Amino acid sequence: MERISISIGGSIFLPEDSDVSFLKEVASFIIEKAKKRKIGIVTGGGKTARYYIKLGRALGVNEALLDMLGIDATRINARTMIAALGDACYPKPALDYEEAINALQSYNIVVMGGTTPGHTTDAVTVILGERMHADQIIIATAVNGVYTKDPKKFKDAKKLDKIDAEELIKIVGGMNAEAGSCGVIDPLGARMIARSGITTKVVHGKDLKAFSNAIEGKEFDGTTIVKKL
């Protein structure tokens, strides 16, 4: 049975960015894909995490504790995802990789949030992929792929259909590594992708056609990251 580790960005859990009907649609989509697969899901914290991290930083909280605020936000989103998935998945957020792997022995879907201060959602998704011997990793985010530069800031940014892990590291290498920083893939996640050697696909989380095609191994709107071109 195929195994997939999926990162779902925090934006789908916020009312201003999504709605209940879309969350239900995502849940139905995952349930359908899990009929023939083992799926591990890692939820991001999104704006909720960034809000509390910003508040904590204003209060003078150190980076490790700011990370814990972010982790708590990801676990709220994990519980929300579980509520949408219902009986199809393990009934609570896995708190670590061991719990997730054990849960996948009995369930086809397990959901978790963050784990350890300093480990980003992307990194957790890749490490989960390594631990569950995933065939591929899907990063469903707020951008439809990896670009040469931030497409929200630069009009000449170009989307890359296929790149290798080393090129990804070069592209994201200058990003901020503080708690709450955001980008299509963070530097730690990029290094974990390179280490794992697992084919990773980046899609827009709200484009379920691209999401589906990426999972099914079909042509999709997004970026494929391989160990070496």
Image (cartoon, rainbow, N blue to C red):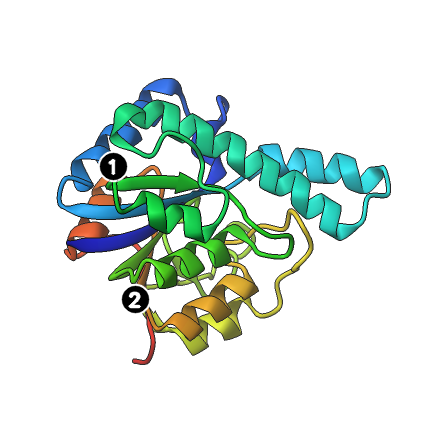
Q: Residue furthest top?
A: 20
Image quadrant of residue 19? top left
For this rendering, which residue is in front, 115 or 9? 115
**What amino acid is at disc 1?**
Ile
* Left or right for 193, reference 61: left
Image position, residue 174 (x, y; %)? 62, 68
Mark 2 packing: few (<14 Cα in 10 Å), some, or many (20+)?
some
Q: Residue at x 40, y 56 (%)?
A: 128
Dot 1 falls on a residue whose secondary structure is helix
Q: CA distance from mark 2 to mark 1?
A: 20 Å
For this rendering, which residue is in front, 205 or 135? 135
Q: Residue at x 27, y 25 (%)?
A: 87
Question: In the drawing, what numbered circle is on residue 199?
Answer: 2
Dot 2 falls on a residue whose secondary structure is loop
Query: Sequence order check: which comes first, mark 2 or mark 1?
Result: 1
Q: Is residue 127 visible?
A: yes
User: Circles 2 and 1: CB distance less than 8 Å?
Assistant: no
Q: Residue furthest right?
A: 60
Question: In the drawing, what numbered circle is on residue 30?
Answer: 1
